[in-house]
Image (cartoon, rainbow, N blue to C red):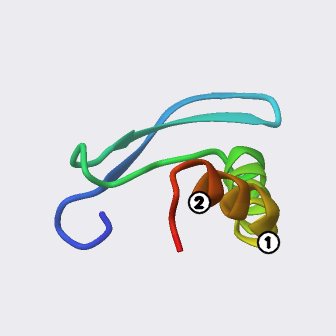
Amino acid sequence: MINNDIEITVLDIKGEQVKIGIAAPKQVPVYRKEVYVQIQEANKEAAGNTAAFESLKDLLGGE
């Protein structure tokens, strides 16, 4: 259990593979590590891309 509302369960063990189940509230995002890392990298790239923001702002007539 994690924080009274997230439950981790071992579903199956075959050799060196372990399958787990995660029960968590819908508002708690649960990602595999490699997916989480990709999301973080995409967020960093998007945050650093001010040129696209400036182009959109100009298109919308922003200051």
Amino acid bearing label 1: Gly
Residue at image x 77%, y 50%?
38
Quadrant of res 5: bottom left
- Mark 2 = which residue? 57
The residue shown at (76%, 57%) is 37
- Residue type at mark 2 is Lys
**16 up-or-down from 47: above or below:** above
Q: Residues within 10 Å of mark 2 (few under 14, many from 20)?
A: few
Q: CA distance from mark 1 to mark 2?
A: 16 Å
Image coordinates for residue 41, horizontal then vertical, percent: 79, 60
Q: Which residue is mark 1?
A: 48
Residue 6 drawn at (x, y percent): 28, 57
- Number of numbered tags placed on the structure image: 2
Indicate the quadrant where residue 47 lies.
Answer: bottom right
Q: Residue at x 79, y 71 (%)?
A: 48
Q: Residues within 10 Å of mark 1 (few under 14, many from 20)?
A: few
Residue nearer the viewer, 37 or 33 = 37
